[in-house]
Image: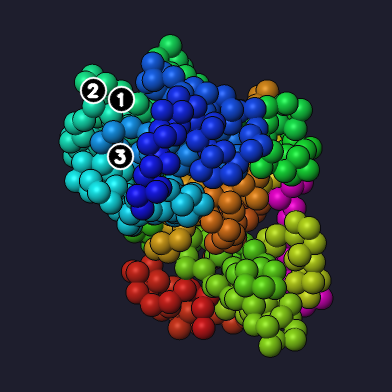
Amino acid sequence: MSSQLAIAARRGRRWREDSIFFVRDQFGVTNLDGWEEDTMLAWNDPNKKRIAMKASKGPGKTTKLAWMAWQFLASRPYPKMAGTSISSDNLDDNLWPEMAKWQAKSKFLSAAFVWTKTRIFARQHPENWFFSARTWPRQADPQRQADTLAGLHADYVAFMLDEVGGVPRAVLATAEAGLATGIESRIVIAGNPTDVDGPLYDACTTERHLWELIEVNGDPDNPKRSSRVSVTWAREQIEKYGRDNPWVLVNVFGKFPPASLKGLLGPDQVSESMHRPPKAGLFEHYPRILGVDPGRMGGARSVIFPRQGPVAFLPVVMRPDRSERNWTQTVSGRIAKAFDKWDADIIFVDDTGGWGSGIIDDLHMGGYPVVAVNFAGKAIDPRYKNRRAEMYFEAAEWVKDGGCLPQVPELQREGTVSQYVLNKGIFQIEEKEQVIEKLNGESPDLWDAFVLTFAQPVAPRAPGQVGAGQRVGHAKTEDDDLEASRELAGVGRAMIDD
């Protein structure tokens, strides 16, 4: 321990003046990207009180926060630091373990400091030489949020804010107040430019003159790009979606999306729709439509979603059974059973990429009115980029206009994640791969099955007319009417479930 402190005493001044030397000396890092050098050189200058990293996907911005934090802890006397992120989980999963990772690479840092889940402190001065993890309550008022970074008073103070795009302005405001006193006070923020609002957007626009801005990207043609971002991946995204696609702008080029980028639906709108009681007598003359999203083998769900005019009913959800050798026929049979039991009119099946072709063939052979739908196909209405955008917009308008969704919690999450932009007069929404990433790898199968019920117009029923389901041999019974009435009252299972 004493030998390590002696080394620190000899090298402390150089560590403080040259953060690149500190990283090389303590972590063995020798090759830095151009943007990494720019960041650490900015950190060398104590007059640059505010540093903002606006980054694309995956360049290693959290690593830079950890380097700067350790350099500050190791080279200033009695520093007090605080770190936060968009959520406690994000802080626990990213910045805080990153601090532990780099501490383990340094004999001096391992000997001189103690890492815990909420605090890093100097062994010899635990009370007044530390870096504390702070979180802010999402539902709290601005005053309580502002308290997150309050209470740090010392000659050397630093605040580290990771994934700052979603951090409330009130949290950053407290850190700003900390710049008023002390010998050296610093703020570093880092995040992806996903939102045209919040602290990162402010630092890049209205408060640009106050911040040292480091822009990080994965642009394959930029010499200062992050080497951690795959060139092949970046070129694939550009080729697949286009350079002006909002997702590409954010995740490849590290640029803010167009100011017009908006969510199709808000969580409150979906919640209100799920709690809106359907009224008997207002939908019976509408056609009965089944939207089917056939899941792929490996865990994805197959979903059958029934809708009749302004009312959508509980969906049937099936998961692939690896022991089932004829899964396609199992799904086809379940759809046929739902069609007959509900006395339905038409079935829309997702056939994007050919995944629904086997089911569609089975239903055709059984004489069922089934329509294959390609989400990437040409829209009926030229205002939309493709069928997917068209169906998503129609489904969103249905919700806003008083449609009644079933009370399925997943619908709120899946129905609110997609965003859209008006690009050269054409409405387009984020690609499914981008939505899956937002959903942490989960596919929006329920919402896709629901939006399929808007695939194309279906003629309304004439008074007293029966559906196609009865014409293929299904005789409607009083039990069916009873089950329907129970469903409308919010009691029982899906109208077409077992």
Tell me the CA gap for discs 1 and 2: 6 Å
Q: Is residue 403 toward the left or the right of residue 353 in the image?
A: left
* Range drawn in magenta: 363-378
Residue 482 at what x, y percent from top left?
A: 41, 79
Badge 1: residue crowd in 10 Å (few <14, some 14–19, many ≥20): many
> How many discs mark residues in the rendered view?
3
- Kindly identify the residue that appears in the image at 41 percent across and 53 percent down: 110
- Kindly identify the residue that appears in the image at 78 percent across and 75 percent down: 362
Q: Is residue 242 toward the left or the right of residue 74 in the image?
A: right
Q: Say which of 234 and 310 sits in front.
A: 234
Label 2 amino acid?
Gly
- Kindly identify the residue that appears in the image at 62 percent across and 72 percent down: 299
Badge 3: residue crowd in 10 Å (few <14, some 14–19, many ≥20): many
Task: Identify the disc placed on residue 185.
Answer: 1
Question: Is residue 264 within the magenta segment?
Answer: no
Residue 199 at what x, y percent from top left?
A: 39, 28
In the rendered image, the vertical position of residue 16 relative to residue 492, given as above or below: above
Task: Identify the disc placed on residue 82.
Answer: 3
Q: Quadrant of residue 230?
A: top right
Label 3 amino acid?
Ala
Q: Which residue is mark 2?
A: 182
